[in-house]
């Protein structure tokens, strides 16, 4: 499971839209949508509901969100640690 896909999903849910997540993460809205779709396909479940008001977690998404968030955060911490080690 790709941590960047998890980060895209978590950010989209936090901000309420794919386009807001794209702007914050430096992707296009279609790029965020592709990542979330790929994550859902990989897991075999629908994680977010897309409505005219944005996106929200499904019941399956609510159940998995803590794990997806932790994976994204752990990957970010690893990137920061690697950058710090490289700077030394």
Image (cartoon, grey):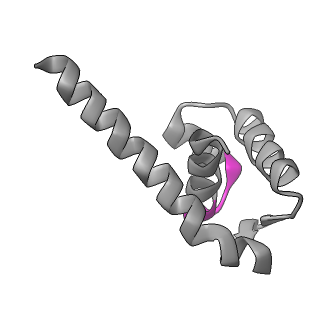
Q: Is residue 80 magenta?
A: no
> In which quadrant of the rendered view does residue 82 lie?
top left
Residue 1, above or below 69: above
Magenta stretch bounds: 13-18
Q: Is residue 16 magenta?
A: yes
Camera-side residue of 15 and 80: 80
Residue 17, above or below 31: below
Give the quadrant of the N terminus. top right
Name the residue at 58% across, 40% down.
Answer: 4
Task: In the displayed orientation, state which residue is furthest to the left.
Answer: 88
| Magenta stretch: helix, strand or loop mostly | helix
Residue 66 locus on image (x, y percent) = 55, 70
Residue 28 locus on image (x, y percent) = 68, 31
Name the residue at 77% across, 48% down.
Answer: 39
Name the residue at 81% across, 43% down.
Answer: 38
Name the residue at 86% across, 64% down.
Answer: 46
Give the quadrant of the C terminus. top left
Residue 22 locus on image (x, y percent) = 61, 40
Residue 36 horizontal side relative to residue 71, left or right: right
> In which quadrant of the rendered view does residue 14 lie?
bottom right
Residue 85 horizontal side relative to residue 33, left or right: left
Residue 70 locus on image (x, y percent) = 48, 60
Residue 54, above or below 79: below
Number of numbered discs overlaid on the protein picture: 0
Q: Can the viewer see residue 49?
A: yes
């Amino acid at each position: 499971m790709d941590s960047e896909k998890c980060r895209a999903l978590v950010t989209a849910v936090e901000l309420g839209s794919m386009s807001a997540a794209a702007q914050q993460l430096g992707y296009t809205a279609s790029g965020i949508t592709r990542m979330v779709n790929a994550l859902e396909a990989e897991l075999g479940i629908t994680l977010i509901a897309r409505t005219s008001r944005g996106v929200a977690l499904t019941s399956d998404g609510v159940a998995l969100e803590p794990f997806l968030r932790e994976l994204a955060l752990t990957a970010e911490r690893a990137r920061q640690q690697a950058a710090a080690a490289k700077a030394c």
